[in-house]
Amino acid sequence: MARKKIIAGNWKMNMTPSEAVKLVEELKPLVATEDADVVFCVPAIDIIPAMEAAKGSNIEIGAENMYFEEKGAFTGEISPAMLTDVGVKYVVLGHSERREYFAETSETVNKKMLKAFEHGLTPIMCCGETLEQREQGVTMDFIRQQVKVGFLNVTAAQAAISVIAYEPIWAIGTGKTATTAQAQEVCKAIRECIAEIYDEATAAAIRIQYGGSVNAATAPELFVQPDIDGGLVGGAALKPDFGKIVNWK
Ligand code: 13P
């Protein structure tokens, strides 16, 4: 069965709750499609107002992070039950900005993955190399490690419904999109890694996004690649351009 595309916005630390409502209202008619799952991953405080504003549309509201414990003395964190209680289905885990600025590791990402599945949340697990790693030729070794550790003890059935976002760090927010060949090559290798860990059926089912300076001009050539099942979009997800990205065909 053909994989349905999943095109997600990652708002990062942008948009106050009132701005979030306005943006959802503005984008709602522009992102209408049945061809792709459309997800807006928003700051925690924006989740409820964004969800209200998205009512009746095809937009799913997702989270940008969550903690791996159920509840308790973890000041400032958001639990998986808090997300599911308000109807969140998707959660971004292990974004490179969280790895870089908030000391996330593949091990903590793995704990979050397991906890997300326990609560029926679909993770969008991010991976990607630095420019130095690409130049040293260790891109795939590094990403395979991120994927292998991230999916430790995740079952094949859980992996099959997961989303992986390949985001080369050097392409994030830099205006420097990876070439379609580079993006396809790594997404294909990630799928092969999933086949090695699990089996061909799981690899054929899992959805792999590309992220990093995706815009309306680059989306069509990226999304047509056989192993790229959509995108995780930062800057361009905050603009009407996102409608063009979603309706890339
Ligand atoms: P940009 O699209 O702004 O490069 O951000 C990509 C990203 O980090 C999405 O998670």
Image (spheres, rainbow, N blue to C red):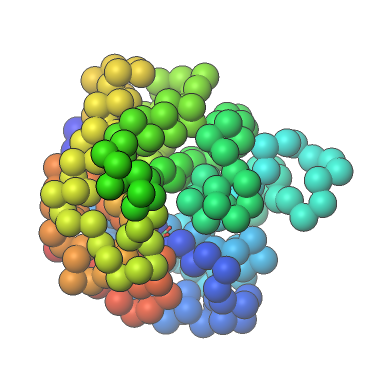
* Residue situated in front as seen by the camera: 116 or 234: 234
Q: On the picture, is 86 further left or further right than 156?
A: right
Q: On the picture, is 26 further left or further right than 135?
A: right
Q: On the picture, is 208 further left or further right than 17?
A: left
Which residue appears at 13% of the width and 59% of the height?
A: 221
Q: Quadrant of ligand 1?
A: bottom left
Quadrant occupied by the N terminus: top left
> Which residue is the extreme one toward the right?
73
Which residue appears at 67% of the width and 37% of the height?
A: 68
Which residue appears at 18% of the width and 71% of the height?
A: 217
Residue 208 shows up from this direction:
no
Q: On the picture, is 237 further left or further right than 24?
A: left
Counting from the top left corner in percent of width and height, residue 6 is at 32, 51
* Residue situated in front as seen by the camera: 241 or 152: 152
109 up-or-down from 103: above or below? above
Counting from the top left corner in percent of width and height, residue 78 is at 71, 50
The number of discs equals 0
Counting from the top left corner in percent of width and height, residue 110 is at 55, 31
Quadrant occupied by the C terminus: bottom left
Residue 193 shows up from this direction:
yes
118 up-or-down from 14: above or below? above
* Residue situated in front as seen by the camera: 128 or 50: 128
Image-quadrant location for residue 44 = bottom right
Which residue appears at 49% of the width and 31% of the height?
A: 150
Counting from the top left corner in percent of width and height, residue 156 is at 40, 20
